[in-house]
Image: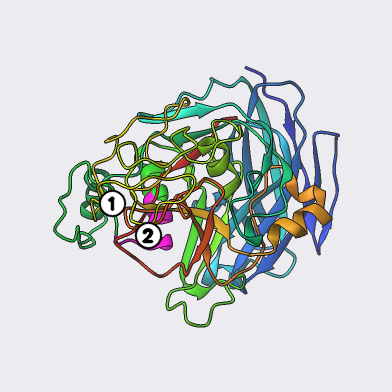
Amino acid sequence: MWAFQWFFLLGAGLATAQNNYITALDFQVEKESEVVVNYDLMATEADNYYVVSVIFKNENGVFTPKNMLGDVGKIENGGKNKRIVWPAHETLNRWNGNLTVELTAKLMGKKAPVKPSDGMIFVEGGQFLMGDGLGDGGDEEKPTHAVTLRNFLLDAHEVTFQQFDEFCKATGRPLKSDNGWGRGQQPAINLNWYEAIEFCNWRSEKEGLKNFYHLEKSKKDPSNHNPSDKLAYAISIFPSASGYRLPTEAEWEYAAREKGSKKRFGNGKMRADPVQMNFDPAYPNNYSITGKNRQKPLAVRSFSANTLGFYDLTGNVWEWCFDWYDASFYSFCVENPELNAQPTGASTGTARVIRGGAWNSTAGACRVTSRQPLKPDVFSTEVGFRCAKNAD
């Protein structure tokens, strides 16, 4: 194990670097009560991991907060835009003034390879043309644009009631209604976007992983422009965290299209057949046929998976994605190609993206490029989710 250490002192808004490994440091107070430290961690060799620690100092002494969030502690990748958040609240009154920050990074050695959690599938990243290349969709699915993704992990099936009920019981919240359709391996429904990301954090903590999200329910999210969202919780994300998260809509589409191949549906098929997927077949067209309308969601894995091993990416229930919905975002991406590397969607919005269609959706809505908006505080019998995770 190596134990090289690098120190940086930050005071009065100034940052100085003592070597070439950690750069671009700054810190500031945000939202009146949070100290935020931003830094870049330059990797010395591939596959190393680091331990990063923080000490705050002023004339009153030295203080190491125990409730810091984000890119602190074990860091498995170097890179830019690392972020540490200290929710100082009333403690900040004692530590403001001539506050300095000492950041220490220790190079520990080679990191262990990321292993897929139970029920997750490793997806090798790559480049693909995102959007409707078959001429089936509306303007919100166009133009196609080249997107590049890193490796990631994604649940093979939607989160089930069995999984979500465990979360509800562990966190002391009432169980969600199953609408009389059963629990167990049925996809969890009647949950909003915020509850989906709270499940992700709970699942992370259960496995000793770093939370990807930080929720502040007492504050409103400035990126949320929907005045009718009764929750609008302030959300911070830590992109390099090891914990669970919702997939971006780019990751979702890439997995549904079997690593970006030209597919119409998430089961790898070009035609919607009610024998092979759960949707409303009452309105057949040139890429769907009629048949049994089940009028409810079915247990996960009721139909065959696509070639990557994913179930029900078409039909059954819509799935929450991380991104804010913007109908013109694809055009914006063409004009700003720098957004197409590991995209996370629009920076603000009034609704989040849902993908995949549901048990009562037409074949058109179930296409892998179809994208729809849903206000994040809304819950429905038609909407569930699956979890993703960084793979490197």
The kind of secondary structure element at disc 2 is helix
| SS label for mark 1 | loop
What range is drawn magenta here? Answer: 190-199
Residue type, mark 1 in image: Ala
Crowding near the residue tagged with mark 2, few <14, some 14–19, many ≥20 C-alpha atoms within 10 Å: some
The residue wearing badge 1 is 188
Residue at x 63%, y 38% (from the top left corner): 52
Res 70 seen here: no
Residue 25 screen position, x and y as percent: 78, 50
Q: Is residue 345 above or below residue 328?
A: above
Considering depth in this image, is 255 or 216 the residue closer to the camera? 255
Q: Report the residue at 36% width, 38% height from top.
A: 157
Of labels 2 and 1, earlier in sequence is 1
Q: Which is the main secondary structure of the residues drawn in magenta?
A: helix
The residue pinned by badge 2 equals: 195
Asked whether residue 380 appears in the rendered view, the answer is yes
Q: Nearer the viewer, residue 133 or 374?
A: 133
Identify which amino acid the numbered label 2 is placed on.
Glu
**Is 10 or 254 nearer to us in this picture?**
254
**Residue 162 marker:** none
Q: Is 189 left or right of 198, judged from the image as shown?
A: left
Q: Position of residue 278 (x, y in %)?
A: 32, 46
Quarter of the view holding residue 13: bottom right
Q: Residue at x 48, y 44 (%)?
A: 287
Residue 14 to residue 256: above or below: below
Q: Is residue 45 left or right of residue 327?
A: right
Q: Is residue 192 magenta?
A: yes
Report x, y in % for residue 22. Answer: 78, 39
